[in-house]
Amino acid sequence: MINKARTTLLAFLIIIASAILVSAGTEIRITQNERLTSGLSYYGNYVYWIESAGNGVHAYDLTAGKRTDIDGHFAYNQIASYGDKVVWAGDGGEAVYMYDISTGSETKITPYGSFPDIYENYVVYTNYYDRYHENDSIYLYDINTGRETKIASVYSSPAIYDKTVVWSQANSSSGYDICKYDITANRTGILTTLNSSIPETELDIYGDTVVWTESHDLFMYNTISRKKTQITDSGTAYEPAIYGNRIAYEYGSGENRGIYIYDISASRITRIPDSNRAHGPSVYGNNVIYIDSSSPETDPDVRDIYLYDLSNAPVLDNIVANFTSNITSGTAPLIIAFTDASTGTPESWQWNFGDGVTSNEKDPVHTYLSAGNYTVNLTVSNSHGSGSKLATIIVSENVTPVIFMANFSSIVTDENDPLTVQFTDLSQNATLWNWDFGDGATSTLQNPSHTYESPGNYVVSLTSSSENVTASRSATITVLESSSSVYSKSGGGSSHSSSNGGSGGAGGSPEPAKNIAAREISQVFIAKGNPVEFDFPMNATAIVNISFDPEKTAGKTTTIVKMLRNKSSLTPDAPEDEVYNYLNIWVGNGGYGNDENNLENASICFRVEKSWTEDQNINRNSIILNRYSDKKWNELPTTLLGEDGKYLYFTAKTPGFASFAITGKIEITGTETQSAADDTQNESINGNMATDVDQLPEQNQNPNTSDKESTEMPGFEIVSGIICIIGMFLFKRK
C-alpha cells in the first residue's frame, strides 16, 4: 500500500512540539524550513521520513507530538509504514530494515533488498544480487514466522494491501503487465496489460482498486469489475496514492505542478493546495500530506510538509475543457486563432500546439510552419480541478512550381593527346540526360567523360528532361594543335519551368534568476545497473538529451538544464574560445550527478545553430563541450553526429554533470598567403583546360583580378579553388 510510503525523492522533516489540530478544508504548514530529506511515509498517527544528510530515519506521532530518531543504516530514499512498524531500504538502498516504534526493536529482514512495502504482518520487497538484475525476485516476508517466500522473478517495485501484492512486469510482446499475487491462494496472475513499453514503478493498491501512471497518465483498475479507467490524459501525472475512494497524485511539471484528488465515487478532480511546487502526496483517512518546495531558487534544500483536511473541502462544478478554432486545416504557413470555450471557471490555460510550441494565453494565435498532422491539447485548471481537450490540425505542404533548368560544367582530366574531358551535369530536377559531344559521339549518362581525337571546335549540347519538360544547354570546346590549350565558349540554350509536380524532484544551482535565459526539466526512474536517458523534447535549450549508466539507485529523479545569458556564477573564468552557450546541468538531489562515483559512461547530446558558425566564421570541427571542474575549464571528447537544415548535432563524453560551455574556434583566412600561392600557380599552369561556360561573371573572376586577366586564363576559377583548399590545409596544420 504505497500511499503510506512514498518511495521517490521527497524531502520534509517534522519537528513540532505539540499535537496537530487541523481545520476542515484548510491547509496547515507543519514544519518550518526543514531540509535534506529524501523519503516520506504516512499512516495512522505516524509520519516517517529519511534524512539524506545523516542517512537516518525519523518518526513523529501526530497525536502525542513526539519525535523518535532511528538508526537508518545509511537509509536511501525508500520507506513504508503500517501502524507502529516502518520499513526502509538501508545500506545505501541495498538492504531492508524494519523498526517497531512501540517496542524499540529493529530487524534486518534481508541484506539484498530494495523497494519495501508493508501491510499488517507482511513485508514485500525486491531482492537483487547483481547490477544486471538477472536474478532479481520479489519476496514476501512473514513478520510473525520470519519466513521468506519468493513470489515472482522480476526487478520491480511491489505494493501490498491485505492479502494481495501487485507489481509491473515485462511480457513477451515487448510491453508490460500489472500482475498480482494472492497470498491466501498462493497464486499469481495478470490483472491488465499496459499500453506502454516502459515499466511503471509508480503504483498503489487499496481494497479492489489498483492505481498507476502509464506514460505519466493516471489509470485505475477494479479487480472485481475488471474495468480499466484512464483518469488524466496530459502526460504529467506522477506518484499516485490511494486510500478509500480518494486518489492523490502530483500533476504538472517544473514550476507549474500541484496536488490533485480524484474522487472515485463522484468521478471528480479537485486541486487542494494553491502552490505550484507541491509534490509527493500521501493520503490517509481524510488527510493528505505533501511537500512544498517554496523557495527552490534561493534555497533548494528547504522543503516543508503541509497537511490538508479533505472532510469538508469545498467542491466546485466539474471543470470541462473545450475550445474552437477559426480553421482546422490549410497549407503551410498556417495561422490559426484558437478560442477557449471551457466551462467551470478556468483560472489558467496551458496550450500545447503539437509542434513543440506552448502558450498560457486564454485565446492564442499560432502559426504552423511545416506540413503535418498536429494534436492540439488544451489543459484548463483552477484551484480545485483541471480538464483537457484534444483536437487535430492538418497542415499540408504549400506546393510551388518546380524550376527546371539544364546546365553543365567541364574539366580536362587528361592533357595528353588525345584530349579527355569530364562533363558534370548541373541541371535542376532532371531525370534523363542526352549528350551530343559535337564529334558524332553521344551519351545518356548523367556525368560522362569524352575523348577528342583531333583539333577543332566542337559544340557540346546537353538536353535534360523530366516527365514532360525538357531544357537544353550548349557550349563550344576548342581543341588546338599540339593540345597546347583547350577552352570553352558560351553557347546558346534555353530553360523552362513546369507547374506540375512537387516534393511529395531535482537539485539546482545558486544561479541568479536574471542570468537564466531558459530551462527544461526531464524526469526518469533511476535504478542501479539500468541505463537511463533524460530527453528534452521542448527544444528550450541546446541540450537534446543526456544519458549514463547509474551505479546507485536513486528512484524517480529530476534533471534540470538551465541555459544562461552569461557565464555561470559558479565559474569565475570564461573558456578561451568563442562561446555559443553557457549551461548548468543538475541531475537529482544532493549532488547525485556531480559525484562521478554515482555514474559511468555519461554523455551529452547537444546542438548548435548553423547560423552561428556562419555569422561568427566558426570551424565546425572545432566545436566542443567544456566542463568546469577542479577550478578550471576542461575540454570533453566531442563528436559531430550529423546535421539538418538548421542545426549541427554533437555528442560529448563527460565524467559528471555541473557547469558547461559550448565553444568553437574562429576560422582565420590567410589572404596574403593565398595571393602568393595564386601568383605561383598562375605562372606554372599550362596544358589543356576546359571551364563551365554557364557560370555567372562573378563566379568566373577573382575580385582582385581584372576582366582581361580572367578572360585570358582558361580554368582560372578551378585553379583558385585548388589554392583555397591548399590554404585551408596549411591553416589547419598550424
Image (cartoon, rainbow, N blue to C red):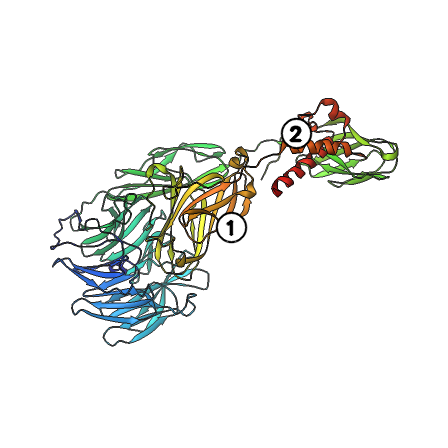
Q: Relative to the observer, which residue lies in front, 140 or 695? A: 695
Residue 696, how many percent across, how many down? 68, 27
Mark 1 or mark 2: whose residue is earlier in sequence: 2
Q: Is residue 96 above or below residue 219?
A: below
Q: Secondary structure at mark 1?
A: loop
Residue 482, how many percent across, how many down? 88, 34
Residue at horizontal 38 percent and vertical 57 percent from the top? 526
Q: Is residue 613 above or below residue 591?
A: above
Specify whether 541 is left or right of 140.
Answer: right
Q: Secondary structure at mark 2?
A: strand
**Residue 127 occupies quadrant:** bottom left
Residue at horizontal 85 percent and vertical 36 percent from the top? 440
The dot on residue 506 is none
Residue 256, how many percent across, how many down? 31, 43
How dense is the environment of label 1, judged by Cα within 10 Å: few (below 14), some, or many (20 and up)? few
Image quarter of the C terminus:
top right
* Circle nearer the viewer, 1 or 2: 1
Question: Mark 1: which amino acid?
Answer: Pro
**Residue 390 occupies quadrant:** top left
Question: Mark 2: which amino acid?
Answer: Ser
Q: Is residue 221 visible?
A: no
Image quarter of the N terminus:
bottom left
Q: Is residue 11 above or below residue 107?
A: above
Q: Relative to the observer, which residue lies in front, 424 or 640? A: 640
How dense is the environment of label 2, judged by Cα within 10 Å: few (below 14), some, or many (20 and up)? few
Q: Is residue 711 visible?
A: yes
Q: Which residue is mark 2?
A: 497
Q: Which residue is mark 1?
A: 637
Specify whether 45 is left or right of 433.
Answer: left
